[in-house]
Image (cartoon, rainbow, N blue to C red):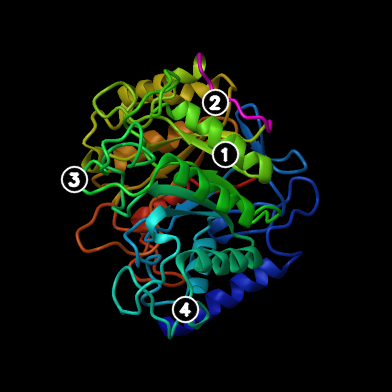
Amino acid sequence: MIARRRVLARLALAAALALGGAGSSGAAGTFQPAGRGGSLLPRGWLSTRGSQIVDAQGNVVRIASIGWYGTDGPAGYALQGLWTVSYRAICDSIVAAGFNTVRIPWSDVNLDVQPRNIRESGTVDFKANSQLVGLTTWEIFKEIVEYAGQIGLKMIFDHHTNDGGGGQQPNGLWFDLGPGSDGTDGAGNRGTVTAARFKANWLRFARQYAGNPTVIGFDLHNEPHTGNWGQGGPTDIRAMFMDVGNAIGAVNPDVLIICEGLQRYRGEAPEGDLRPVLSKPVVLRVPNKLVYSVHSYPFEISDVRPDSGPAAVARYEAGWGFVARQNLAPVWIGELGASNPGPGGSAHAWATTLLDYMNGFQPPLSGSWWNIGTEDAGANPNGLQTAWGVGNYRPEQLYATDKLLFRP
């Protein structure tokens, strides 16, 4: 019975996407549907207009994204879930849950390595993914982009770490070798990626997906938490954002360039400090392509208090919300998530506070839930689903994700 429901769900999804073409806009202000009342983004590129994200016709849109991790891991690790279902089923499950975009993290050391053929987390079942046999992570990305384009799902790539530790890079930087680094990743492991190699890898992405509007953005580096903003030297992240962002724009002027604020765990902006933007904004040669980003999790994950109520809202506003409030640029909450944000759940107050804050903007701030699929036992957040494939969504998480969807 469950298998039959999955087949029917995929057929219904395919039928919906076939109406007028996946991801296309028809009359002004109309968009093709995703699941749960959400909408796909239109075909074509996105740009910015003040604090808004707009499509090629100037319609205001919302990036309703979800993370799909695994390729931020060590060499040989694949996107999660491929060890049990096909990549197409996972893309279908993202759209069926109402999202219009998927954020995929990557590590430098994993790009040109083939995933291992072992039926376990972090690897690939090639019986379910016969199209991926013999492919490297880089080549697998191309297959996923092609299918995502067919069903109207947009993609954002995110540089997560150099050497595949997952989560944050311990040294807080975007490189771990060369000037500005102590030659390690911050956890005692020898560094392997210079700032020059980091930039070169981003240019590979830029060239590969130039002219392909399925890939709408590049999140330049995940959760930086050391270095400086605008004070110069090899650890000046603002300088990196402009150098790499402008290099990308020279070969792929259409993508959004996403820049995350420095996280200040015990300071005034643990989600990401965008206060320096007032005096030292990121300036790109290609106009209307800059998006700033922060991340937010409840206390049980972030260890940051207060995580709800007026005090949390005041912190949001002072640390990053003012960027959108003052119409300086869009702010995308590039990660937010919790195992139980529903009514009565341990993270309900956090979810209600943050989502009400995001939806209080006109238009609402864009966001990206963490994450699709299932997580390892005991993890928090534990993923949107109880099992991989279309459906199997946790109702307590749908309480939150339904409030993130794009509803024109």
Q: Residue at x 35, y 27 (%)?
A: 227
Q: Disc 4 to disc 2, how far (Cα)?
A: 40 Å
Q: Nearer the viewer, mark 3 or mark 2?
A: 3
Badge 4 is on which residue? 134
> Which tag, 1 or 3, sits closer to the chain's start?
3
Badge 3 is on which residue? 188
Residue 302, image x, y percentages: 25, 39
Give the left or right position of residue 124, taking residue 23 as reference. Answer: left
Give the left or right position of residue 341, taking residue 355 as reference. Answer: left
Residue 96 visible in the snapshot? yes
Q: Disc 1 to disc 2, how far (Cα)?
A: 10 Å
Give the left or right position of residue 368, taking residue 348 as reference. Answer: right
**Amino acid type of disc 2?**
Val
Q: Main secondary structure of the magenta part?
A: loop
User: Mark number for residue 257?
Assistant: 1
- The answer to whether marks 1 and 2 mark residues whose Cβ atoms lie closer than 8 Å is yes
Q: Is residue 21 magenta?
A: no
Q: Quadrant of the C terminus?
A: top right
Q: Disc 1 to disc 3, how far (Cα)?
A: 31 Å
Residue 329's place in the image compared with 214, above or below, is: above
Q: Secondary structure at mark 4?
A: loop
Q: Disc 3 to disc 4, how far (Cα)?
A: 33 Å
> Which tag, 4 or 2, sits closer to the chain's start?
4
Badge 2 is on which residue? 282
> Which tag, 1 or 2, sits closer to the chain's start?
1
Q: Which residues are magenta?
A: 279-287
